Image (cartoon, rainbow, N blue to C red):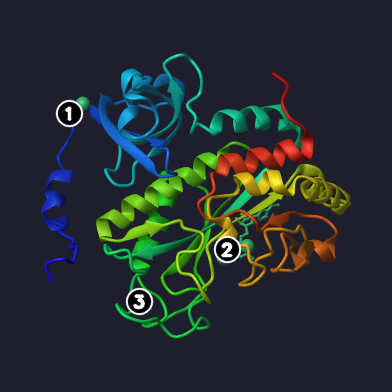
């Protein structure tokens, strides 16, 4: 069929070039977040160094923001400020990945640079020692935007066999999931696990616990790695919170959170205190918890309703769940189940800190 999008790969041929020595140079892949919640990247050559570059040792760079919807054409330069460095699992040592913040020419953070505000909040409340753990759900699509392995016309059998599924007909594209897991470990991303999800072609990986701003950095890098790995396997990654309407689970970004007080004996008092504060700002949180989340937070398919704030021990139909083990022990952490799969982790973690511990004065 001429209209079908096909996938061409020359992985075998590429191998002999990837092995060539680099003459004392390394390739730094600068990565940033665009206006659509995607990641972009471009490469540059730098001298190889004995120890890994620290962000502040790397040059500030720039890109054409008018090509990414991040700046007007007449004033198009957006600056890339390195904030975190990781070993590059695609090119191997000594090459690196450089996560960068976007800054405008006038010295203000770019509109889509949500890391800037989050970092200020993390800094101001560092004494809380905040830990986050995010559960990133996503759907793998073929190049024609159909969930991988779904029949061209019609639907797979109803949900049930797919969650943590094993075996043909239950899961697809496990090679992408495996490759991504290894890439995260190689890069030093704090990935803590992965599982097949309730809807076929839907998967999840978890990152955390991470301390403060590290949460957003590691999740964004994990997202970049997933897009990049899937590119090699000819699949698309969708972070749409409700990719298929109807009786199919949506995709979330469950946010597990604790402070030192919550993790210690008697911590439940601090957990309940935080939940009360979250209740009072439900609407403000929903506003930054992802686009299209109204299609997902219906009160069905293991979600709470978008219009009400609820919480409970072991309740997966609530906005906030206290894990059973924490409920029993009386301390630990809680899970905010509201964020959608496409939300920005800097915005989520930032507003949780602001709501629980106060805004940062200028
Ligand atoms: P679920 O049962 O909701 O599917 P997962 O096992 O997928 O839970 O994810 C749990 C997440 O909680 C992990 O990312 C983990 O790092 C995180 N986590 C565990 N303990 C804490 C804690 N004390 N504070 C914050 N996050 C935590
Ligand atoms: Mn150019
Ligand atoms: Mn999970
Ligand atoms: Mn899940
Ligand atoms: Mn969860």
Name the quarter where the N terminus is drawn.
bottom left
**Disc 1 designates what residue?**
23
Helix, strand or loop for disc 2: loop
Quick check: marks 1 and 3 in contact, CB under 8 Å?
Answer: no
Q: Position of residue 288 (x, y in %)?
A: 60, 44
In the depicted structure, whether residue 348 falls above or below residue 242: above
Q: Position of residue 187 (x, y in %)?
A: 41, 45
Helix, strand or loop for disc 3: loop
**Mark closest to the chain's N terminus, 1 or 3:** 1
Quick check: marks 1 and 2 in contact, CB under 8 Å?
Answer: no
Name the quarter where the C terminus is drawn.
top right
**Disc 3 designates what residue?**
150
- Is residue 62 visible in this depiction of the protein? yes
How many marks do you count on the picture? 3
The residue carrying mark 2 has its beta carbon less than 8 Å from ligand 4: no
Q: Nearer the viewer, residue 356 or 35?
A: 35
Write down the quadrant of residue 11 in the picture.
Answer: bottom left
Front label number (1 vs 2) = 2
In the depicted structure, whether residue 9 falls above or below residue 258: below
**Disc 2 designates what residue?**
296
């Amino acid at each position: 069929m001429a209209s079908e999008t096909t996938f061409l790969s020359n992985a075998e041929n590429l191998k002999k070039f990837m092995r060539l020595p680099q003459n004392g140079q390394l390739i730094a892949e600068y990565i940033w977040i665009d206006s659509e919640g995607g990641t972009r990247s471009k490469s540059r050559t730098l001298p190889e160094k004995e120890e890994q570059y620290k962000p502040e040792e790397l040059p500030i760079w720039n890109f054409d923001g008018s090509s990414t919807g991040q700046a007007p054409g007449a004033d198009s330069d957006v600056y890339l400020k390195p904030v975190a460095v990781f070993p590059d699992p695609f090119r191997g040592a000594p090459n690196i990945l450089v996560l960068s913040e976007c800054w405008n020419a006038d010295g203000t953070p770019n509109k889509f640079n949500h890391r800037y505000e989050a970092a200020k909040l993390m800094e101001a409340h560092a004494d809380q020692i905040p830990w986050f753990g995010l559960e990133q759900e996503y759907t793998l699509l073929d190049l024609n935007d159909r969930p991988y392995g779904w029949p061209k016309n019609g639907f797979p059998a109803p949900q049930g066999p797919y969650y943590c599924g094993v075996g043909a007909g239950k899961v697809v594209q496990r090679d992408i999931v495996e490759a991504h897991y290894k890439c995260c470990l190689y890069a030093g991303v704090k990935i803590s696990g992965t599982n097949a999800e309730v809807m076929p072609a839907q998967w999840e990986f978890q990152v955390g616990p991470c301390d403060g701003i590290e949460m957003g950095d590691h999740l964004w890098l994990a997202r970049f790695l997933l897009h990049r790995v899937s590119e090699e396997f000819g699949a698309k990654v969708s972070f749409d919170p409700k990719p298929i309407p109807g009786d199919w689970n949506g995709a979330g970004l469950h946010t597990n959170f604790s402070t030192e007080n919550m993790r210690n004996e008697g911590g439940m008092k601090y957990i309940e205190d935080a939940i009360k504060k979250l209740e009072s700002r439900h609407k403000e949180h929903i506003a930054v918890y992802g686009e299209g989340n109204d299609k997902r937070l219906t009160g069905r398919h293991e979600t709470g309703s978008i219009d009400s704030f609820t919480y409970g021990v072991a309740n997966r139909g609530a906005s906030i769940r206290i894990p059973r083990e924490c409920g029993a022990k009386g301390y630990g952490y809680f899970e905010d189940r509201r964020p959608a799969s496409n939300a920005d982790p800097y915005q989520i973690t930032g507003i949780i800190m602001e709501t629980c511990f106060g805004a940062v004065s200028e």
